[in-house]
Image: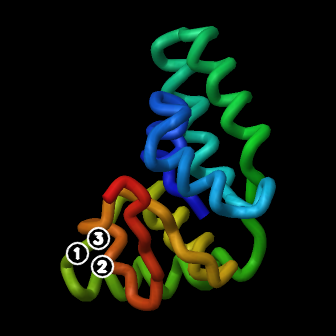
Amino acid sequence: MVDTNIASHFMRYPEGKTAQRMRSQSVRSVGISIIAVSELRFGAAKIGSARLHDQIEWVLTRMTVLALDAPVDAAYADIRAYLERQGTPIGANDLLIAAHALALDLPLATDNIREFSRVPGLRVENWLD
């Protein structure tokens, strides 16, 4: 599963590191959480860019959009409680994306290793290294 920043990198650099990594996967086997898609769409809406909207649609044709479903809610609750007890919370959307990846037993490709590495059991990969 790719995080928002990996999808954004793919849009900006369609021949870059992220694109190379995606090409090494089978067709449409790369998933993206609906939460990350929401963040991408918000970015386009906020600046009112039709071009960015079109780029998002293009990127989404190359990925599988993963809907939220149970047991994401249970993973969310466990992760949030743990991180709050540790005094190391993460952002609300990142928490949902992490819970989504954990619930589906998928690694999360992200450039935000520092934040996501706080989530116990979450496998993180930096596709930009």
Mark 1 vs mark 2, foreground winner is 2
The answer to whether residue 43 is above or below residue 16 is: above
- Identify residue type, mark 3: Pro
Tag 2 residue = 118
Total number of numbered labels? 3
Characterize the local packing of mark 3: few (<14), some (14-19) or many (20 or more) Cα atoms within 10 angstroms.
some
Please say whether residue 110 is visible from this viewpoint. yes
Residue 89 location, quadrant: bottom left
Residue 48 % position (x, y): 54, 10
Label 3: which secondary element: loop
Residue 9 % position (x, y): 45, 39
Tag 3 residue = 89
Give the mark nearest the N terminus, 1 or 2.
1
Numbered badge on residue 88: 1
**Residue plotted at (48% across, 63% down):** 109
Characterize the local packing of mark 2: few (<14), some (14-19) or many (20 or more) Cα atoms within 10 angstroms.
some
Mark 1–mark 3 Cα distance, whole angstroms, equals 4 Å
Please say whether residue 67 is visible from this viewpoint. no
**Residue plotted at (57% across, 18% down):** 52
Relative to 14, is 25 on the left or the right? right
- Identify residue type, mark 1: Thr
The answer to whether residue 114 is above or below residue 44 is: below
Residue 96 % position (x, y): 53, 64
Relative to 15, is 64 on the left or the right? right
Residue 27 % position (x, y): 80, 55
Q: Badges 1 and 2: C-beta atoms under 8 Å apart?
A: yes
**Residue plotted at (64% across, 76% down):** 73
Q: Badges 1 and 3: C-beta atoms under 8 Å apart?
A: yes
Label 2: which secondary element: loop
